[in-house]
Amino acid sequence: MSDIIEEEYDEPKKADPFILLPKSNMNLVSCKDAYNREKNENRCYFSKGDGFWKDYDPVGFSIHLGRYKYNSDLSSTGFVRRNTVGGMVRDMDDTLTHKNMFGVYKILCDSTGNYSVVCVFITRGQNIIPGVFGLQYEYFSWEKLECKSLIFQAFHSMVDGIFEDKIVDHHILFV
């Protein structure tokens, strides 16, 4: 009979890419809670006046819009499209991203039945850190949003169901 030698294996800790960023007074957890509360009441936390903007720290955080580059590969079957985006969310699902990022993915449908995926993220720092997004970072073209009305439109479409004249077919929140 052979002896099996078991060795303990400690998975190396993932380095925190956010650690070198300056501290911020913005409490992202409070923002996520307020967003969910207002969304459930069909209000937009990102309205131009109050809510998010009184807490937002533009020095410590930034907001980015991502457009999926491979929309022609999206399936015409609803559950397959949702699973594709769900996989993107699972790719990022760890403590570092939950602590430092907040975003939403949207599956959009235009008037001809073509589907596309966009996402909007609030993240610590002034740039998106590629390693935090996993492989999907390369699957999107990224644009930093600095205009309140664009940010409002991107997040408000969760309530009214329209984004860039396209119907929101499905949304997946990353909190």
Image (spheres, grey):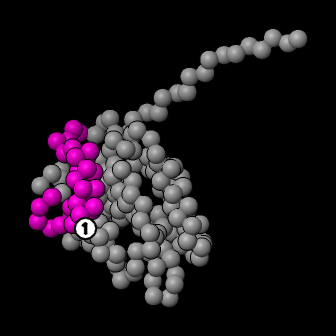
The answer to whether residue 156 is visible is yes
Could you say where residue 170 lies in the image, as x and y percent from the top left? 44, 69
Counting labels gives: 1
Q: What is the span of residues highlighted in magenta in the rendered image?
A: 22-51
Q: Is residue 74 above or below residue 83?
A: below
The answer to whether residue 125 is visible is no
Residue in view at x 39 percent, y 35 percent: 16
Residue in view at x 88 percent, y 11 percent: 1
Residue in view at x 47 percent, y 53 percent: 89
**Magenta segment: does it hold 82?**
no
Residue designated by label 1? 42
**Residue placed farthest to the right in the image?**
1
Disc 1: CA contacts within 10 A as few (<14), some (14-19) or many (>=20): few
Query: Judging from the image, what secondary structure is the residue with disc 1 in?
Result: loop
Instruction: Quadrant for residue 87, please give it.
Output: bottom right
Residue in view at x 60 percent, y 73 percent: 77
Could you say where residue 122 lies in the image, as x and y percent from the top left? 30, 55
Q: In this view, does 61 lie above or below 146?
A: above
Q: Which amino acid does the dot numbered 1 rest on?
A: Asn
Q: In this view, does 171 lie to the left or right of 22?
A: right
Could you say where residue 150 lies in the image, as x and y percent from the top left? 25, 71
**Residue placed farthest to the front in the image?**
41
Q: In this view, does 82 lie to the left or right of 17?
A: right
Q: In this view, does 39 lie above or below 113?
A: above
Could you say where residue 56 lies in the image, as x and y percent from the top left? 18, 53
**Magenta segment: does it hold 43?**
yes
